[in-house]
């Protein structure tokens, strides 16, 4: 097989590869169930006042502040160590 024929086959292969990597065909989505708009949804706002907001801030936000995690590991010796369960609980809270 001569070099011209090899280049031609390589060109055809390259063109086929480029066209096969094109975008997927556009598909039309199926029908969507209609939404019942005869009755508007009932939305009841949460009843918060200043005192409950301050209480939540103090109990939920400030209570999770961790100044010392009590880690027992060591970077120098590559010891993983542990942290107390209270720290885990504060993080999840």
Image: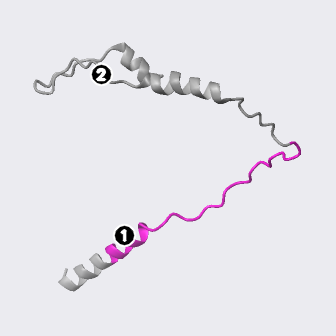
Locate residue 20 relative to residue 54 in the image: left or right: left
What x and y, as percent, mark residue 62? Answer: 46, 26
Locate residue 19 relative to residue 82 in the image: left or right: right
Identify the mark at residue 68; answer none if there is no mark: 2
Identify the mark at residue 17; answer none if there is no mark: 1
- The quarter of the image holding the N terminus is bottom left
Identify the mark at residue 37; answer none if there is no mark: none
Vertical order, 62 against 22 (above or below)? above
Q: Secondary structure at mark 2?
A: loop
Residue displayed at 48% across by 66% down: 23
What x and y, as percent, mark residue 69? Answer: 30, 21
Stretch of the chain drawn in magenta? 12-39
What x and y, as percent, mark residue 64? Answer: 43, 24
Vertical order, 9 against 59 (above or below)? below
Q: Is-magenta flag for residue 32?
A: yes
Q: Residues within 10 Å of mark 1 (few under 14, many from 20)?
A: few
């Amino acid at each position: 097989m001569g070099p011209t024929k090899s280049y031609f086959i390589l060109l055809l292969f390259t063109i086929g590869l480029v066209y096969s990597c094109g975008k997927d065909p556009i598909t039309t989505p199926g029908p969507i169930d209609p939404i019942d708009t005869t009755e508007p949804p009932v939305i009841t706002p949460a009843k918060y006042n200043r005192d409950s907001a301050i209480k939540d801030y103090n109990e939920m936000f400030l209570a999770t502040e961790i100044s010392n995690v009590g880690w027992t590991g060591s970077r120098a010796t590559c010891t993983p160590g542990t942290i107390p369960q209270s720290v885990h609980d504060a993080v999840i809270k």
